[in-house]
Amino acid sequence: MLRKILPTLIGVSAPLILSGCSIGMALSGHPEPNFDYVKVGATREEIEFEMDAPVSTQSMADGTQEATYKYEVGNTVNPGRAAMWGYAWLTIIGILGEPIYSFIELTQGHDEETKVVYGPDNRAIALSGYTPPPLSPEMKAAQEEQEKHIRKRPTPRSDQPPASVQPAPSQSTTSP
């Protein structure tokens, strides 16, 4: 009797236990490195800021060092996807579909590896491994449109001296 009831209980409770996992997985993740800063000529500090610490470093005979970086691509935090899973979970279909949603979240992202060769001055002289595909024209247009709405720090104009150098206008105060 217990052999018949136990699988049924496990089968019924598994979707309930897994409920909400897809939401949590969509809200967790790792930011991708910004490859605009990972290029030949960049300093070790700039590259490690984007890629984190290397998993291995090997000194070469010619005085250079080869560092290997591993990172995850395609699994950034996604509140929109989490909201979609949350909305679906509120319906009966969402509760029953939670194992499918969790599987989808488990398959997000993939591991990549990039090797960087540093010269004696700790600047990158060669890169090999993963490089992201170029942005589509639509994505470039969307990024340019977003840039219009980002508040930026003003840059001083070169034709005028900084405000701290300019003399303040004299003000005379007279008392009546």
Image (tube, rainbow, N blue to C red):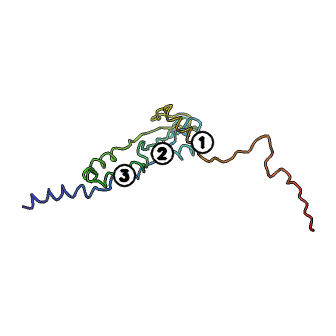
- Label 1 to label 2, Cα distance in Å? 36 Å
* Of pointers 1 and 2, the one earlier in the residue sequence: 2
In primary-sequence order, the first of circles 1 and 3 is 3
The amino acid beneath tag 3 is: Met
Element type where label 3 sits in the image? helix
Q: Residue at 25% of width from left, 58% of height from top?
A: 16
Q: Measured from the top left, where is residue 79 in percent x and y?
A: 42, 51
Q: Which residue is mark 2?
A: 54
Q: Distance from label 2 to label 3 (Cα)?
A: 26 Å
Q: Are marks 2 and 3 in contact (CB under 8 Å)?
A: no
Number of the front mark, 2 or 3: 3
For label 2, the crowd category at 10 Å Cα-Cα, with few meaning under 14, some 14 to 19 and many 20 or more, is some
Residue in the image at 42% along x and 44% along y: 72
x 24%, y 52%: residue: 96
Residue found at the very far front of the displayed protein: 176
- Observer-side mark, 1 or 3, equals 1
| Residue 14 relative to residue 49: left or right | left
Circle 3 packing at 10 Å, graded few (<14), some (14-19), many (20+), is many
Q: Amino acid at mark 2?
A: Pro
Mark linked to residue 111: none
x%, y% of residue 161?
A: 81, 45
Q: Which residue is mark 1?
A: 148
Disc 1 secondary structure class: loop
Which label belongs to residue 25? 3
Q: Earlier in the sequence, mark 2 or mark 3?
A: 3
Q: Reply above or below: 94 against 135.
A: below
Q: Given contact means CB atoms under 8 Å apart, are the residues at marks 1 and 2 in contact?
A: no
- CA separation in Å, label 1 and label 3: 32 Å
